[in-house]
Amino acid sequence: MRRTLSSRTTFLWNFLLPILLIAGLSGLLLMCWLGKITGNDGKPMSIEVLCVFTLMWALVMVGLIRSLGFLKRVEVDDQTLYVSNHLTEVRIPLSEITDVRETGGSKSLTRVSIGFHHASPFGRSIEFLPRLSLHLSADPVVRELQALRNQASAGNKVGRDTPFDPAEPVFEAGDDCVQIGKDFILYGCEGKDQVCERDKVFIKDLECLTVRRSKKSGRVKAIDYKVKAKLGTFEIGGFTPKEMEQIAHLLESRAKAWPVQFLEKESSGSSPVGLLVAGIGAIAATLCSGWLLHFGWTVREQLQSAIGFTLYGVICLGALGVAAFLWFVFWRALRD
């Protein structure tokens, strides 16, 4: 049965507090630029001081933006770990876990870190805030995950051989064809009788197999596979929903037989929380960038000193970079 391990306050630490800090610090900086906050002599701050403050603000903003979604929402059942950043959910087999430990200082902010054999879409490790309503530490959660990992690893050591149909399944979609054998994937051939050897990929050479599903319908959207020592990933798609399910099932059985890392990734473009956070952040960063450019143009005669001009240029470029990054995140969330 699927159960939640992470704290209900994860969203608060991930999004609400960083956004409040971003808004508060941005408001203070704006008051400084408008002369509402003055120096000890009662005079408005100089351009150089304002530029230094703005550079410090930009650095803090980068850190706060990077912290968005850092803590993960984690659920678990007897075989799988479900990890989500409120936009995308990834299913990771428990046998992939290499290390579970307690991190952090204050008991109210104690975190649990989980390491993996292979890099997941969220990296080689994740962190989450455990539910501490019944315990004063995360130790019970750590011990539970370690026990589930040991159980899953022991179960994967037996029954690795999978049944294999000598008539290797072939799936055709238009000019594309996917052929799945006992130890290889053939993608891109033009038919059963015209197999191109150069298109054959041996499963033992794969680094990762990822099935991407729609969170709303649960259907397989695409299947990605990454080959060791090769850049980029290859995507299998364009088949009927039934065929995509069959391909996913066959590839999962082959991945477990070798074994190869197999992940299932759920994404949804209709998540109101993700779209709201990404959209508001992108709009705010764009407005801030435009205001900085406009303000710089109005006080251009005062930016004659080298330090003032240099810092202002760095600040503007940084603000534009943050805006571009947030628009990219928003576009990805909308597309998925």
Image (cartoon, rainbow, N blue to C red):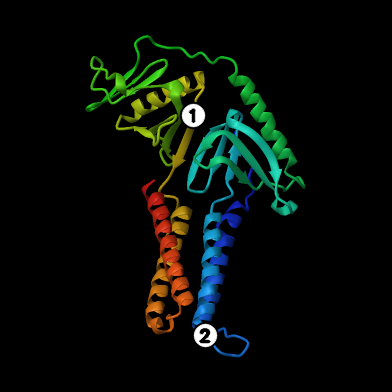
- Mark 1: amino acid: Phe
Is residue 23 at least partly visible in the picture? no
The spot of residue 238 in percent (x, y) is 29, 32
**Figure check: 112 above or below 165:** below
The spot of residue 91 in percent (x, y) is 52, 35
Is 120 on the left or on the right of 133, as rendered?
left
**Figure check: 331 above or below 145:** below
Q: Name the residue located 46 percent from the left edge and 69 percent from the top edge.
A: 315
**Label 2 crowd (10 A; few <14 / some 14-19 / many >=20):** some
**Label 1 crowd (10 A; few <14 / some 14-19 / many >=20):** many
Question: Tag 2's secondary structure?
Answer: loop
- The disc label shown at residue 262, or none: 1
**314 or 109: nearer the viewer:** 314
**153 or 216: nearer the viewer:** 153
Question: Do labels 1 and 2 touch, CB within 8 Å?
Answer: no
Is 152 on the left or on the right of 183, as rendered?
right
The spot of residue 302 in percent (x, y) is 43, 84
The spot of residue 322 in percent (x, y) is 44, 61
Is residue 152 at least partly visible in the picture? yes
Q: How far apart are marks 1 and 2 (CA)?
A: 57 Å
- Mark 2: amino acid: Gly
Q: Name the residue located 68 percent from the left edge and 32 percent from the top edge.
A: 146
Tell me the residue that label 2 is attached to. 35
